[in-house]
Amino acid sequence: IILLIIYNSWRLSKQNLKQLKKLNNQIVNTNTTLEHTLEQLEEESREKDKIVKLVAHDLRTPVAAIAAIADLLPLEKDENARQELLKMMKDSCNNSMKFISSILESSGISKKAIEKEPVSVNAYIKDCASMLQIGAAEKNQKLIIDLLTEDKSIEVDKDKMKRLMYNLVTNAIKFSHPGSEINIKVQEEIDKNKLLISVQDFGIGMPDAIKNNLFKSNSSNNRSGTEGEKTYGLGLSICKRIVEAHNGKIWVESEEGKGSTFYIELPLD
């Protein structure tokens, strides 16, 4: 009887130990999930703080310009000068509106907000390029497109991917010299079952200090184009969000004084 009692106690202890181990594993997994969630929330909070600082910094200049012009207008008697001041005020307003639109767009991009539909890769790239031909023509630049030999279908959010291509190609136009070429190339990575899109320019390029922080919401990356075009730090941050929401990757290769190539890798399935 004593042996039976000892055996039953041992068996119950072993079962309890298994249950305790199982419960402990569940607690560890739950803690890991909670830590990961907390890290994500902290990252989102830091990102929002950056955006608030960016808004405060980048809106200060155009608003100050509008205020200064408003003070000058009543004092200016020459009609041509008045018209020039009004044009400057309008340009400052337009720049502010573009910047605010970028802020709103950046905050609205997530995997949940993506609405995918199948599109022809070649037709879609052609459509995006035709939309940007006018901007290139204004600087006497050529957009050269190298499409897939055999067309493929891919599921993407058409509007957001169009914004991605618009941002990358307009950047290439801004930072390329008049009369230069911009290459848009599409390749299938058969071994990875992925699509690789590249946008290459032969413009001013960028130093490592800028390249390393390029996809962050950071106003310090703001530079003027070769013809003085304005640009904001959110454009490439938006591109990164769009690509990641499609489970893809984006990166850049660049050499100062020689140009830049942006790569977007997207899953085909």
Image: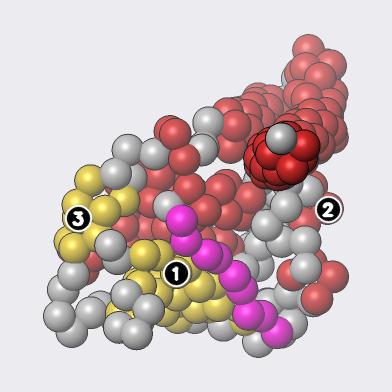
1 vs 123: above or below:
above
Label 1 to label 2: alpha-carbon separation: 27 Å
Residue type, mark 3 in image: Val
The answer to whether residue 135 is seen in the rendering is no
Q: Where in the figure is residue 129, as x and y percent of width and height?
A: 32, 63
Residue type, mark 1 in image: Glu
Instruction: Find disc 2 in the rendering and name its residue.
Output: 220
Q: Where in the figure is residue 88, as x and y percent of width and height?
A: 68, 34
Colour convention of the picture? secondary structure
Q: Is residue 199 left or right of 213 when viewed as pictured?
A: left
In front: label 3 or label 2: 3
Residue type, mark 2 in image: Ser
Q: Residue furthest front?
A: 1
160 vs 58: above or below:
below
**SS assignment at label 3:** strand
Name which of mark 3 and mark 2 comes first in the sequence: 3
Name which of mark 1 and mark 2 comes first in the sequence: 2
232 vs 269: above or below:
above
Q: Where in the figure is residue 78, as x and y percent of width and height?
A: 72, 25
The disc label shown at residue 119, or none: 3
Q: Where in the figure is residue 113, as x and y percent of width and height?
A: 43, 33
Local crowd size for mark 1, using a 10 Å CA cut-off: few (<14), some (14–19), many (≥20): many
**SS assignment at label 2:** helix
Instruction: Find disc 1 in the rendering and name its residue.
Output: 265
